Structure formats: structure tokens, C-alpha cells
Amino acid sequence: MSSVPRVGPFGGTVNGPSRLALALGGLVSVFAITTAAPAQAQFFFDYGSYNRPYTVKKPKVKKSKPAEATYDHGGIERGNTTKEVVADRKADGPLVITVSLRRQRVSVWDRNGLMMEAPISSGKLGTPTPTGIFSILQKNRVHFSNLYDSAPMPNMQRITWSGVALHAGALPGYPASHGCIRLPHGFSKRLFEVTQMGTRVIVAYDPVRPESIQHEQLFAAYPDGVPSMHALMPGETRVADASDSPRLGPPREVGSVLGVSTALASETPPGYDAMINLRTQRKAEMEKLAAAVADAQAEKAATVAAAKDVMASLDGRKVAVRDARVEVNRLASALRTAEQASRAANQKLAKFSQGLVRKTGFTPEDVARAAADEDRLETAALDLADAAEAAKVAHANGIAALTKAEAALIEADKARADAVEKVSAANVKLNQAVEADAAAKRREAKRKLPVHVFVSRKTQTLYVRQGYEPILETPVTIEKPDQLIGTHVFTAMAVDPAKVDVTWSVASIPTQTAPVKYSGSKKERMQAAAEAERAAAELRRSQTAQAALARIKVPDDVRLQIEDVMKPGSSLIISDNGLSNETGKFTDFIVPVR
């Protein structure tokens, strides 16, 4: 008897008694294959049909993207955005820190180019890291957040007082912070060691690279002494142009900064006399302020002494009024007593006279006695009437004396008010003189610190700060004020002590235009968007640092004041925007970049 073949669950034919055994065998085979070749096991089963033989699929191999182009950044090649790189050299000159939110990278630049670079993790959606021009305001190796459950923030370097800082933290490979800029721990430690208070930090969406630049409108620096002759000799000057190649040219002189011809002077640079005059005026102003303090102190002392005399006179007037009031009260009481006595005497005399009228049968002795009594009563009444009249006159005189004393008191009180006002005015004058003198001394003490200048196209104003303190604010002329100028951060990297030359770098961030929604067909929208992108690209290309400098006209007297304190680490910021509301006490300029 032949058996009927039956189709098994995994294909093929299976006799009845061996179905389970074959199924178990198949499972064992699958397990063996899975163990032997795990890479192919995930592609083993094809669930499209039980009866179709399986095929092993080859795993897809992702094509590696070409490495990012590398550049010469001071000896450091940059290609891997997750790689941390540090130059094998010490920092030379002031540092500029740039942060790219798009690339999630932080770069540290010095006079020689790129010095350090590392990945970051910036603010996530909802708490983004603000873009703009900042500086380091506070440094703490050990710090804990006062906003987010005392989270540790090692090697914290604050750039805003509202809570944004650079510090060590977790780097998941994407923006994940609450607004701070997280750094690799080792990198944050090295960065903490090379930065200082006031180090410039530029946070932008796209990468920003400082470049060397020279321009006649950039500030010069005047040495304290008369510059030597070799300061006027021609030499090789590196000019940042499109070719980025050096060319020979005359050294930059003070005259070129002030708009004077660049002809070489025979002894001192053009404009040096103006600087000497400025410094002489500043010294004279310091002496004048000190003298004003002394004069104000003397004036206050005199007004205080006069006020003391007035107060003593006022006290005497108060005593006189008090005594006059006491005397008037006494005289009033005496007047009342005298008037009462006079009335009583008159009443007694009248009563006696009435008794004589009613009485009859007077003897000569009675008449004589009555006449004597009447004379006595009349005399007493007259005497008391005179006393009452005298008391009345005395009381009137007392009131007059009191009125006079009160008038004198009023005059003395007016004199007191005038004296107090004079003392108050003298005190205000002294405080103003002391504050002006102290401010001048603070400015003088901060002359050793870098000076920072900000020019805003929005407000058409030039601001100067030094040592976190506002020094100057003045209107400035900007050509074509309706056209975008971009944001440019110029940093004085070095100053030749024997010359007026300053080595400048610039980092530029073009101002982006707002996106526009287009209507029409898809083709029309695409054409309009392409045309807008071309216009935007042309606009960005026009916002160069050279063009920005050429559009700004700084008054000569303001320029002299700035150049008088120009030194390495000083900066000039030009922007379409105004100051951020973060700018205030204990901050440098904070400028938003959108």
C-alpha cells in the first residue's frame, strides 16, 4: 500500500509519522545556520511564499561620504566635525572664539590663525543658544546651575548674565542643552586656561573665520613717547584682499587714520601734535577736576559754618519767642487780676453809695464818717483802675514783643532754609565733583585695558566702553544708512610699540534678509525664489568689512580719544543691529545677530 505524499509546512513531502520530526529538524537547521552565519540570518526567511527556496540577501553597504575639505588653519587640518584638535603651540595675542551652530563646532583663533577646535552641543529646540557678539563675563572652574536643579557646569565661562555660558557637558552629537554651549571636558579645561575676562565670543549659525585686514579707517595706536624714525620707513604690509597675498606698501600712519595724506613726515607722524594736545588737555582736565573737588570741599565747609551760625541764631530766636509767649501769658493773667480788682472796687463803691441814699437820720458824726469811707473807696477804685490800665498797656506791649520775636523767628527760619539749601547745593556740587574726579581716575586706571567701540547702523550712534564701563556715546555718520552693512568684529591683535601700526583681524557675519512667500504657479515660484536667492547672495557679497569701514565717518576728536587708548585686545564692532538689552553693568558690548 503506497503512502500519499503530503506537503510539509516548509516545502517538500512528508509522510505522516515523520512530520513532527522533520519540522523539528528544520528548526534545528535554522538555529545552526543562524549561529554559524549571523550576518546572513537576518535575511534568511522570505515570507513571500513557503514553497519558494530561500535566498541570502547581501547587506547594503552605505557609501561613505567624501571627507570635508581641509584648509590651512594655522597648522591644523579640519575635516572631521566630531574631532577635537589643538595646535601644538601657545596662544599668541588676543583670542577670538567662534561658535557655529550649524556645524556644532567651536573654534579658537589667535594672531597666527586657528589654535583649537572641538565639537559642541548647543541649545535645543525651545531653548536655543542666542546668536550674537559676546565676551567672557565670568569664569568659574566649579559651578552649578541656579536654573536647572544645580546641574554641574565645570569650567564655566559665562557670556550673558541671563544664563548662557560655555562649559563641559554631554555631547550627544546634536543640540541638546538649555541654551549653553557644551564642550568636551578636556577641551573645556584647556580653553579655560587660555581665555581671560573679556575674551571675544562670536556665536553664529554658519562658521565664521577671522581674517587679517588693513584699512585707513581702522584705528591706529599712539605710543606714549615720540615714535622713532623707523616708524616712518616703508616696509612689507600685508593687506587682506581677494587674493590674500602680501604686497609692498607704505606703513600705516596716523595721518591716514585721520584722513590726512600718507606722505612721510620728517620727524613725527602727522597728527602726533594733536595727540600730544589731547593728552595735555586730559592731564589739565584731571588737575581741574581735582581742583574742583578741593573748591567744592571748601565751599561746603563755608556753607556748613554759615549754616551753623544761622542755626544758632534760629535757636536764640526760638528762645526769645518762647520767653515772649510766657511773658504775654503772665501779663494777660495780671491784666485779668487787675481788671477783676478794679471791677470789685467799683462795685463796692457803688454799693456803699446806694446804702447812703437809703439811710436817713444822719448825725454829723455819721456824715463825716460816711464821707471818709466814700473817699477811701473812691481812692481804692481809682488806684485799681489805674493798675488795670497799666496791666492792659503791659499786656499790649508783651503782645507786640511776641509779634516781633515771632517775625524774627520767621526770618531766622527762612535763613535756615536758605542755609540748608546752600549746604545741600554745596554737597551736590561736591558729590558731582568727587564723582567726576573718581570717574576720570577710573578711566585713567582703565587706560591699560582694551577699548571697545560699537557702531550701530540702526541707531546711527558710536559707543565706547572700556573695562565694562561706558566712556562715550556720540552720533556718527554712515553713508547709505538705508542699506545693510552686515556685522563685522574687528580685533586689534597686536600693536607695534615703536609705530602707530595696529594688526587687525575681522570676522564678518552678513545680515540675512527675511524670507518671502511667493505666489503663482510652481514654475513661477521657483523662478522667483531663484532670483531672490541670487539677489540675497549678491547682497551678502556686498556686506564686506572693507565696504563697512568705507561707509563710516568717525569724528576726528572721537577718533583721537579712541586711538589714545588703543592696544591689543581692543575691538571695533559694526552692525546693522543695536545693542542687546543684555548690555549693561559688568558687560562688554553684546550685539544680537539674526
Image (cartoon, grey):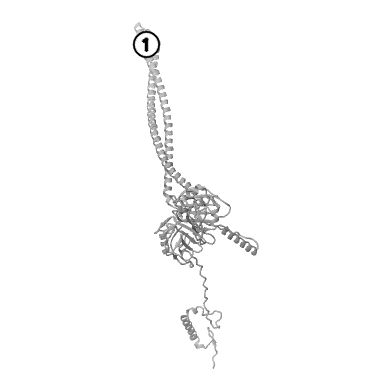
Image point (48%, 78%), residue name: 39
Amino acid identity at mark 1: Asp
Looking at the image, which residue sits at the far front?
A: 266
- Using the image as rendered, state which of residue 18 and residue 581 is in the foreground: 581
Looking at the image, which residue sits at the far bottom?
A: 1
Instruction: Give the image location of residue 353, x and y in percent.
Output: 39, 12
Q: Is residue 398 above or below residue 507?
A: above
Q: How many marks?
A: 1
Instruction: Give the image location of residue 408, x and y in percent.
Output: 42, 28
- Using the image as rendered, state which of residue 104 and residue 573 is in the foreground: 573
- Using the image as rendered, state which of residue 263 and residue 337 is in the foreground: 263
Looking at the image, which residue sits at the far top?
A: 364
Instruction: Give the image location of residue 531, x and y in percent.
Output: 62, 61
Mark 1: secondary structure: helix
Q: Could one spot residue 128 in this view of the protein?
A: no
Instruction: Give the image location of residue 315, x and y in percent.
Output: 38, 31
Q: Is residue 576 above or below residue 176?
A: above
Image point (64%, 64%), residue name: 523
Q: Is residue 330 above or below residue 192?
A: above
Residue pointed to by mark 1: 375
Give the quarter of the image for residue 426: top left
How many residues crowd around disc 1 within 10 Å: few (fewer than 14), some, or many (20 or more)? few
